Amino acid sequence: MATRADEIAARPNEIVNEYGTVTINNTGIVCAGSELKSFGWIQAPPGHSLGSVSFSTGALVSGSIWSGGTFSSAGSTFDVVGVGLWAKHFQGFSHGRVTLFSGNFVRPIKWTLASHTGKYDYVFTLSGTVEGELYNGRFIAGTTKQTINVYQNQWFTDHGGDIRLGSTKFGVPEPGTLGLFGTGLIAFAGTMRRKLFGS
């Protein structure tokens, strides 16, 4: 039977995030402080995170917030930051914080109603293509899917929601990038293992 570690190892180019606040209105969606739970082969211990995932979209260009639609990628962002122990020993960084990926959405962003239970409880998926730069200066692209809970009665107060689960899978926009990405993750994992468990 496959363990969680086996699942992570089988998807070395996937970033997983959970929790974090989301603000949703017609001018765009903003997510702040979603916890980075895994970065390729590296998985955060239970109750901890490796850093954070934050993103923003452009304005709603079709459909509606409550039935689904499309948000613009204009002015969007998508950033992954490693913090604390996970960043301090990453590829020579020593300041305890490193930008692992910095990019943006590059195509229209889909906003889909996944479920509506009860009177106020909604679940949406936000999905789109992101491109940007890795910590090592290489360019990479991928797709992200963020599952978002919205409670309509709360939304009327603060336009807020929260991330249930997010997954971003990277591909190869230029030759060799994916190999370098994997090599960097292996080096990072080895450093963390030595630090946590001793040489």
Image (cartoon, grey):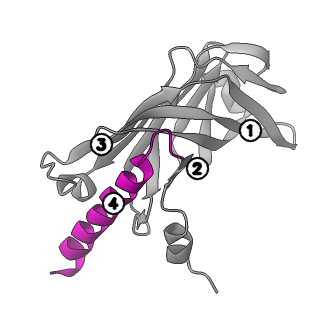
Residue that numbered label 4 is attached to: 183
Disc number lying in front (3 or 2): 3
Residue 118 higher or lower than 12, as above or below: above
The location of residue 24, given as percent across then percent down, is 63, 24
Distance between mark 4 and mark 2 Cα atoms = 21 Å
Q: Earlier in the sequence, mark 4 or mark 2?
A: 2
Q: Residues within 10 Å of mark 2 (few under 14, many from 20)?
A: some
Kindly identify the residue that appears in the image at 63 percent across and 42 percent down.
146
User: Can the viewer see residue 152 in this picture?
Assistant: no
Q: Earlier in the sequence, mark 3 or mark 2?
A: 3
Residue that numbered label 3 is attached to: 135
Frontmost residue, 165 versus 12: 12
Distance between mark 4 and mark 3 Cα atoms = 12 Å
Mark sitting on residue 167? 2
State the SS at label 1. Answer: strand
Kindly identify the residue that appears in the image at 74 percent across and 38 percent down.
124
Q: In which image quadrant can residue 193 be found?
A: bottom left
Q: Earlier in the sequence, mark 4 or mark 3?
A: 3
Q: In which image quadrant can residue 192 be found?
A: bottom left
Residue that numbered label 1 is attached to: 124
Q: Which residues are magenta?
A: 171-199
Q: Residues within 10 Å of mark 3 (few under 14, many from 20)?
A: some
Distance between mark 4 and mark 1 Cα atoms = 35 Å
Distance between mark 3 and mark 2 Cα atoms = 19 Å
Q: Residue furthest front?
A: 175
Check disc 2 and give the amino acid type: Ser
Distance between mark 1 and mark 3 Cα atoms = 30 Å
Disc number lying in front (4 or 1): 4
State the SS at label 4. Answer: helix
